[in-house]
Image (spheres, grey):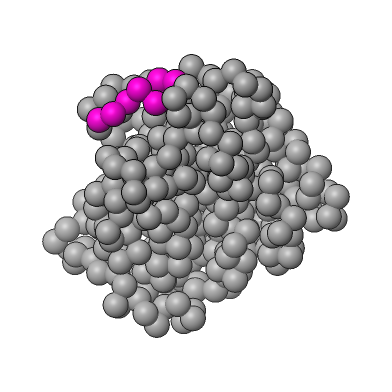
Amino acid sequence: MTHFAVALFSILTVSPLNNFAQQKQDAKGAVQRIKIHSKLLEGNLSGDSADRYVSVYLPANYSNNVNKRYPVVYFLHGYTDDDAKFYGFKKHWMVLSTILDTVFAQDPAHEMIVVTPDAYTLFQGSMYSNSITTGNWEDFVGKDLVSYIDSHYRTIAQKESRGLCGHSMGGYGALRIGEKNPDVFSAVYLLSPCCLSSSSTLSGETVPAPFLRAESIKTTEEFQKADFFTKALFASAAAWSPNPMNPPFYLDLPVKDGKLQPQVLQKWDANRPLNNLDQYIYNIKKLRAIGFDAGDKDIDIAESIKTLDKELSRYGIQHSFEIYEGDHINRVAKRIEKKMLQFFEENLSFK
């Protein structure tokens, strides 16, 4: 049992699976959609529930061999998504459980449990960061969620058998959480990770249009009608520049009175992994493996992971890196099937 599992029962509660869990079953794998309560998410100023859905994929043979234990891969979804979309409970551009069925049917010796928490918030995404406005998401994923899964499923409860990955915002979260918890996870994979570096569009005095639109929003109803990029600014501010004295959103936007706010932007920059990578190099070296990729049409993200590749190479850290032909989403399902799952098969312990 890990050092943080001792406090599990005072931190997390769950409704009995037979009474609460929604189940999606087919001939190969099964997905249980359960609900977990975390004290770390209680009292967030956004008013988001501390009872969070979590989708748990159990491979085909999980129910057949009650003595077998499995590695666990934690998959973090992207901004505006949730766990239900990735596991077929809602319509989406890909269904992760179908991909897992296909891969594990071909290689049952490397079946894994795959877990995705619902990180959809008032601002449509938590950024997997600790914030008084949105809650302690970083600690929830890196500690509480792992403890709960190890206590309720037949996992191989050791870091060598835990992987962490994600797409877009989830890729950002996987690096952020992985580099801070090398005693929990041993392998990390980033799919088109957002937000790794500071935005080049903020280097001058011109204020981008989404920033100006964000400043004009005063109510939740107005926020819900905003475009994607304007909403993303609110999610970033809630995570990286929270302000408990600034209702109704309890955050500081990077623009005020039509002007950029350097102090707020500095807070955002402090949360960009490429800006603080040097401080986590020793932790990253403790990981058994790290990999990342992005499509060539996903220009800003592709450039950021090229920089990540150079930085890790400068420190002599072995890693997997590829720029492929594609955009932010059109090849991600195939990358999961052909690259990411193979990465975990090769780098997690199944013993």
Q: Is residue 208 magenta?
A: no
Q: How many marks?
A: 0
The residue that appears at 64% across and 36% down in the rendered structure is: 198
Indicate the position of residue 317 as horizontal and vertical percent values: 80, 56
Horizontal side of residue 11 vs 299, given as left or right: left
Instruction: Choose between 234 and 277: the one closer to the eye.
Output: 234
Asked which quadrant contains residue 216, the reply is top left
Q: Which residues are magenta?
A: 212-219
Indicate whether 159 appears above or below 165. below
Indicate the position of residue 294 as horizontal and vertical percent values: 64, 33
Indicate whether 146 appears above or below 266. below
Q: Is residue 214 magenta?
A: yes
Is residue 11 visible in this depiction of the protein? yes
The residue that appears at 58% across and 36% down in the rendered structure is: 262
Instruction: Choose between 302 and 254: the one closer to the eye.
Output: 254
Is residue 341 visible in this depiction of the protein? no
Q: Main secondary structure of the magenta part?
A: helix
Indicate the position of residue 263 as horizontal and vertical percent values: 56, 41
Image quarter where the C terminus lies is bottom right
Indicate the position of residue 290 as horizontal and vertical percent values: 68, 53
The residue that appears at 81% across and 42% down in the rendered structure is: 310
Asked which quadrant contains residue 35, the reply is bottom left
Horizontal side of residue 176 vs 311, given as left or right: left
